[in-house]
Amino acid sequence: MNATQAKDRLYSQLAASLKNMSRAVGQTADLFEQLQTDLDAMRVLAGTHAAQFMTVAAELSPEADGGANTEATM
């Protein structure tokens, strides 16, 4: 094998490596886009759960409204 063939082989390996890296970067970009979508959904879900928690806590806490709970006036 002469130097030209070795150089061509190395350039071919480099091209294949760059192609693989380009594909991996593309997949990573797609995964980050999906992650952003999932994080937005989690933010909405967390807000909903916080609102539910605060509502239940307000209903179950008799001292929060000065003892004038509707269940206590039966």
Image (cartoon, rainbow, N blue to C red):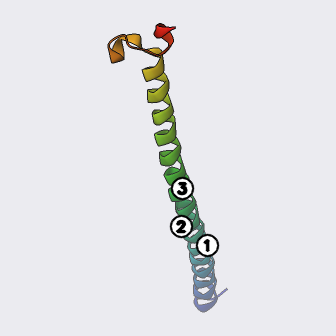
| Disc number for residue 32 | none
User: In terms of image quadrants, where is residue 12?
Assistant: bottom right
User: In terms of image quadrants, where is residue 27?
Assistant: bottom right
Identify whether 45 is placed above or below 4.
Answer: above
Q: Secondary structure at mark 3?
A: helix
Q: Earlier in the sequence, mark 1 or mark 2?
A: 1
Q: Secondary structure at mark 2?
A: helix
Residue at x-position 59% and y-position 91%: 4
Q: Are marks 2 and 3 in contact (CB under 8 Å)?
A: no
- The residue furthest bottom is 4
Tell me the amino acid under the disc marked 2: Ala
Q: Earlier in the sequence, mark 2 or mark 3?
A: 2
Task: Please indicate whether residue 27 sits to the left or right of residue 49 in the image.
Answer: right
Tell me the amino acid under the disc marked 3: Leu
Residue at x-position 58% and y-position 66%: 30
| Disc number for residue 29 | 2
The location of residue 29, given as percent across then percent down, is 53, 67
Task: Please indicate whether residue 63 sits to the left or right of residue 8 in the image.
Answer: left
Residue at x-position 46% and y-position 41%: 47
User: Label 3 crowding class (10 Å Cα cut-off): few <14, some 14-19, many 20+?
Assistant: few
| Disc number for residue 35 | 3
Question: Of residues 29 and 66, which is closer to you in this image?
Answer: 66
Q: Are marks 1 and 2 in contact (CB under 8 Å)?
A: no
CA distance separating discs 3 and 1: 18 Å
- The residue furthest left is 66
**Label 1, on which residue?**
23
